Image (cartoon, rainbow, N blue to C red):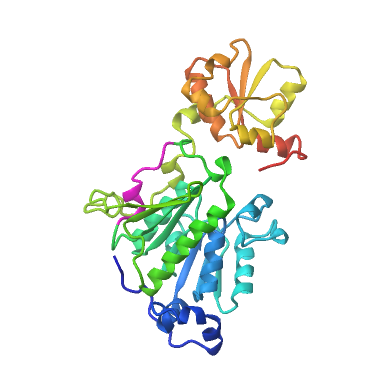
Amino acid sequence: MSLPPLVEPAAELTVDEIRRYSRHLIIPDVGVTGQKRLKNARVLCVGAGGLGSPALLYLAAAGVGTLGIIDFDTVDESNLQRQVIHGVSDIGRSKAESAAASIREINPLVNVEIHNTALDRENVREIFAQYDLIVDGTDNFATRYMVNDAAVLLGKPYVWGSIYRFDGQASVFWAEHGPCYRCLYPEPPPPGMVPSCAEGGVLGVLCASIGSIQVNEAIKLLTGIGEPLVGRLMVYDALEMEYRKIKVRKDPNCVLCGENPTVTDLLEDYEDFCGAVSEEAQEATLDATITALELKEWQDAGKDIFLVDVREPAEYEIVRIPGATLIPKGEILSGEALAKLPQDRQIVLHCKSGVRSAEALAALKAAGFKDAVHVQGGVLSWIKQIDPSLPAY
């Protein structure tokens, strides 16, 4: 369904703006009025990472008058494979500052507002209230639910995107005209069920594909043209080069935007709501967690342990802790790998950062391996504390 323009047009376009945006101006559906609306628009991008990079670049090039950037992270070398708004010289720099510099280089006519902070329950309302539209480039469920809840409570539309390996999704959530994110995903997935991009990877160019869709939807909403993805989920499979659309209906029983909402304010703790690890994993790690330094001491002392790497084979090829045997977490959770594990040696589990090994530890303890432990911080801690020459990813 078509929707009215989100933004009133600015009073005028300057000669410089007319020259710069001429290819927009000669599109009948956009024209001078549409470009004036873009000039008058205030758009916030949550995150200047994989999705935020192409989104910010093209929003700036399109002439969105004010762009807000919220990101508290710094640029890392591993970001450069997909976060094209940053360069080698930006490594170690604030992502928000780096993104702002790139935007000013692309379009100095755009006003950039930097929020170099983590988005949280205390500041999300104040920040969102300053903008007409939110573009969600987050990569974790806790922030996604918070973005959705704040947008609904403030009556703001937002453009959502998600990426993983070769798969992407995008939609527009606007409770006033259609469903919200909770209508599509009423509950977050069980802890450990959906790997993050840091765990499972993402094809760099997929970010451009989904980020571009997000910008396309933002422009349509701001100018009131076309049919935005309200009530529709766009699913993209890069391997098959296939797009498909799925209808998403507004849930009358939605706890947030339904007929009788029970969530009328932001949650106290979104991390707790989404759960980084399950309760079983939390209980399993109590008094069963060692550090990378302790693991090295055990190895040097010749302690009889069986070190298990629960990551995926592709990760194991990148970097490994000496002496580790690869047994992916899925094989442990399914019970398939239990027969491979020795009963007469203490089992030590590790993954990349400690989350997956905690879940595997819970499964082992439930299967009777009572003295099993896991390594806090995983292979990343080993690299940081024991062998910095190894590559981090």
Q: Position of residue 259 (x, y in %)?
A: 21, 54
Q: Quadrant of residue 124?
A: bottom left
Residue 230 in the image, given as x and y percentages of width and height: 33, 60
Examine the rendered structure and indicate whether residue 71 appears above or below residue 6.
above
Which residue is at the front of the view, 89 or 209? 209
Residue located farthest toward the top when viewing the structure as drawn: 344
The N terminus lies in quadrant: bottom left
Q: Is residue 128 magenta?
A: no
Give the answer, above or below, for where 235 lies relative to 276. below
> Is residue 208 at least partly visible in the picture?
yes
Q: In the rendered structure, which segment of residues is drawn in magenta?
A: 179-190
In the drawing, does residue 310 fall left or right of residue 24? right
Residue pictured at 63% horizontal, 36% vertical = 315
Percent x, y for residue 148? 39, 55
Total residue callouts: 0
Question: Does any portion of residue 377 appear in the rendered image?
Answer: no
Q: Main secondary structure of the magenta part?
A: loop
Q: Where is residue 264, by image quadrant? A: bottom left
> Which quadrant does the C terminus fall into?
top right
- Residue 182 drawn in magenta: yes
Location of residue 340 (image quadrant) = top right
Residue 215 in the image: above or below residue 320: below
- Residues 181 and 330: in front is 330
**Camera-nearest residue between 191 and 201:** 201
